[in-house]
């Protein structure tokens, strides 16, 4: 009998738990450790913050889902690893400390925004690194929208998260224009480099910039934030950018508490160092995947921090770990980039394909963005459940009042 403990119920962790739970022998155990009660797909956190997320159809309860898919949900947060005892140290919601034994441990906690030690950023900015933070952000934005007058929102970082958040808030703002009591938002999207989506092809950045300007978003390029105050930000040039609410969505790193946890090797971004098999460099019984892991691909190339990379690593490790439990050898994870899709509002998206040689845009590509989420649902819940959710979503859009 083997016990696999998976820490983190994000896209990668949940997919791994679901596949393993349905495929391992009945005498084996799969335990998913996460402090939340429900799963939210991280690429849609910006929708939660903007109040456009469908909580009824697009969330998943770990407890009931685990019962149907062969794993058990343990509500709690990892705080340490006792490697010699093969125990995970967990903080429970009531504040008590517990220990969870494991034979194989998989860490898939994702990453958080990197504030680059900017003074005041942690104290005065909102982050979208967890469902709790996204929900808290919506409470503040909802209050702001109801306050009337001209209001401003600063968003630092014009990568996918910052761009999607800015576009979603702009659409909400436009939808409230007929309401005389609603606030009018000025959205400042602040980027330290010379273009939005700085890690994407130039043509993709250009198309994204055009759409942001169409949504009346104030894009501020080559603008580096030196400090953050309660009611605004100060740039390295001494400019003050005032705002009622401020978001930080620039850069990523693994949480500080993960660095060298249990004596494991990590890098300067707090990511756990693993082999190409996804096993940690210092312990063959501990694995890591997703944005919290530094996964090599040979010749100094690392797997990029993308949702699709985490999903594919989860599917790979599910097969490889199942084989290991049956006496086979682990297999290396080989990542092939399938491009990227960035949503700009509900009716437009931009995508790269064919090794960034082809740039596509428009309403059809926005449907492709939704399809990626549906494929995630298919992996964790099956084709039948995914199909029922799609039908329910369509019917809800048709019959619910505006």
Image (cartoon, rainbow, N blue to C red):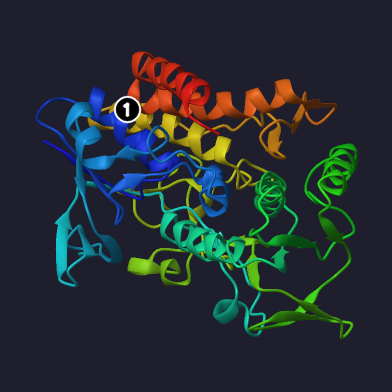
Q: Quadrant of the N terminus?
A: top left
Q: Quadrant of the C terminus?
A: top right
Residue beneath the point at 84% across and 38% down: 204
Figure check: 116 above or below 185: below
Q: Position of residue 236 (x, y in %)?
A: 84, 81
Q: Is residue 362 visible?
A: yes
Residue beneath the point at 15% across and 62% down: 99
How many C-alpha atoms fall within 10 Å of the one at disc 1: few (<14), some, or many (≥20)?
many
Q: Nearer the viewer, residue 346 or 82?
A: 346
Figure check: 103 above or below 375: below
Q: Is residue 326 visible?
A: no
Specify the quadrant of the image occupied by residue 269: bottom right
Q: Which residue is mark 1?
A: 19
On the picture, is 78 further left or further right than 343?
left
Q: Position of residue 294 (x, y in %)?
A: 54, 52
Q: Nearer the viewer, residue 194 or 293?
A: 194
Figure check: 113 above or below 64: below
SS at mark 1? helix
Q: Position of residue 194 (x, y in %)?
A: 90, 58
Q: Residue furthest front?
A: 180
């Amino acid at each position: 009998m083997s016990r696999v403990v998976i820490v983190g119920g994000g896209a990668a962790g949940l997919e791994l738990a679901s596949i393993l739970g349905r495929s391992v022998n009945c005498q084996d155990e799969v335990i998913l450790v996460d402090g939340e009660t429900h799963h939210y797909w991280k690429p849609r956190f910006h929708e939660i913050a903007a109040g456009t997320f469908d909580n009824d159809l697009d969330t998943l309860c770990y407890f009931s889902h685990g019962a149907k898919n062969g794993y058990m949900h343990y509500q709690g947060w990892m705080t340490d690893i006792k490697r010699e005892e093969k125990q995970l140290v967990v903080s429970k919601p009531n504040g008590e400390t517990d220990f969870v034994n494991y034979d194989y441990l998989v860490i898939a906690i994702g990453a958080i925004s990197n504030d680059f030690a900017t003074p005041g950023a942690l104290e005065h900015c909102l982050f979208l690194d967890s469902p709790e933070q996204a929900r808290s952000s919506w409470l503040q934005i909802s209050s702001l929208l109801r306050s009337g007058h001209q209001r401003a929102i600063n968003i630092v970082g014009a990568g996918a998260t910052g761009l999607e958040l800015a576009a979603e808030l702009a659409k909400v703002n436009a939808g409230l224009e007929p309401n005389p009591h609603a606030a009018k938002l000025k959205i400042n999207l602040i980027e330290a480099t010379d273009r939005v989506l700085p890690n994407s092809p130039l043509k993709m950045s250009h198309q994204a910039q055009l759409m942001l300007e169409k949504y009346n978003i104030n894009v501020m390029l080559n603008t580096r934030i030196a400090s953050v105050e309660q009611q605004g930000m100060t740039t390295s040039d001494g400019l003050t950018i005032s705002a009622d609410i401020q978001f930080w969505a620039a850069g990523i790193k693994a949480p500080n508490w993960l660095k060298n946890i249990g004596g494991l090797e990590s890098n300067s971004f707090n990511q756990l160092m693993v082999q190409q098999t996804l096993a940690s460099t210092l312990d063959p019984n501990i694995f890591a995947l997703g944005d919290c892991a530094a996964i090599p691909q040979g010749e100094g190339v690392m797997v990029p921090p993308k949702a699709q990379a985490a999903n594919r690593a989860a599917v790979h490790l599910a097969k490889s770990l199942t084989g290991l439990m049956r006496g086979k050898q682990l297999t290396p994870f080989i990542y092939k980039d399938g491009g990227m899709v960035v949503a700009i509002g509900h009716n437009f998206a931009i995508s790269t394909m064919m090794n960034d040689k082809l740039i596509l845009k428009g309403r059809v590509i926005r449907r492709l963005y939704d399809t990626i989420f549906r494929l995630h649902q298919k992996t964790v819940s099956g084709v039948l459940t995914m199909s029922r959710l799609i039908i329910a979503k369509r019917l809800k859009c048709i019959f619910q009042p505006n």
